[in-house]
Image (cartoon, grey):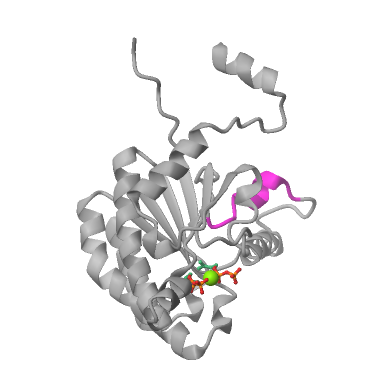
Amino acid sequence: MTAPVRNIPRHIAIIMDGNGRWAKQRLQPRFMGHRAGVRAVEGVVKHCAASGVEVLSLFAFSSENWRRPSKEVDLLMELFSHALDNQVQRLHQNNIRLQVIGDISRFSSTLQNKIAEAQNLTRHNSGLLINVAANYGGRWDITQAVNQLMAEVAAGKRAAGPVSEADIESCLVTASIPAPDLFIRTGGEQRISNFLIWQLAYTELYFTDTLWPEFNAKALEHAIEWYGQRERRFGRTSEQVQEQSDA
Ligand code: IPE
Ligand code: IPE
Ligand code: MG
């Protein structure tokens, strides 16, 4: 008898929440939580790459996170910049492709350049694709997609008239990437916080109280096992899905 095939999600999207509370529990400044959060990313990336996950989307900084105290925003930018300095070579050696999704025009030119370099260096890699969502918002994503379509009409490259779901999808920052199969939010909140709102339409949603700095390979494995138990019906009946999988 062959071992049952494990049902591995092709695309995992994660809201890495709970860094601040993790630090607070330890009577440390929030910054220490964010630092510990970066270390947790390394473990999760390793486990995804080893498990054959194709795409990992990580919410690093939302379009609403600018509302935080400027000191915390500055520290987050610094951490992002350092993480690029320290991690990109290793990602590249491991055949991992890095892509930043979000409106990076608001970042310093130094950070924008580092992002461009990292994307350039890793763009031909064929292993795990990591989407780092930075200054990302799902509403921004849909809006920029619609604006692209309108610009095409204005330039005479597209006929005026109704647009289809496929048209919008082709202009989202995740165009050509399969939608997330598994969404994970750490830190106990049960909300989407303007992450990939279009793309999550049929994603399995997993919420855990574990704070992000404590989310390790074992915790990820737990989420993947949970995903394996889901029946994804996409509007069909359970019987139809069973028939299909028996065929
Ligand atoms: C998530 O952790 C990291 C970012 C939003 C950058 P938080 O900083 O939101 O941590 P909590 O929710 O305050 O614990
Ligand atoms: C969502 O976390 C954004 C990131 C993890 C980057 P927040 O902690 O900012 O979310 P809300 O504001 O509590 O919903
Ligand atoms: Mg939070």
Instruction: Specify the farthest residue to the right.
Output: 161
Location of residue 152 with respect to 94 vertically, above or below: below
Q: Residue at 54% of width from left, 83% of height from top? A: 68
Locate the C terminus by quadrant: top right
Locate the N terminus by quadrant: top left
Q: Is residue 154 left or right of residue 77?
A: right
Q: Is residue 141 left or right of residue 7?
A: right
Magenta region: which residues?
163-173
Location of residue 100 with respect to 246 vertically, above or below: below
Residue 105 in percent (x, y) is at 49, 77
Q: Residue at 40% of width from left, 49% of height from top? A: 219
Q: Residue at 24% of width from left, 56% of height from top? A: 92
Q: Nearer the viewer, residue 25 or 165?
A: 25
Residue 241 in percent (x, y) is at 64, 21
Residue 162 in percent (x, y) is at 79, 50
Q: Nearer the viewer, residue 107 or 146?
A: 107
Is residue 166 in the magenta section? Answer: yes
Location of residue 184 with respect to 148 vertically, above or below: above
Q: Toward which corner of the image does residue 197 lie, by quadrant?
A: bottom right
Q: Nearer the viewer, residue 226 or 111?
A: 226
Q: Residue at 26% of width from left, 63% of height from top? A: 88
Location of residue 105 with respect to 147 vertically, above or below: below
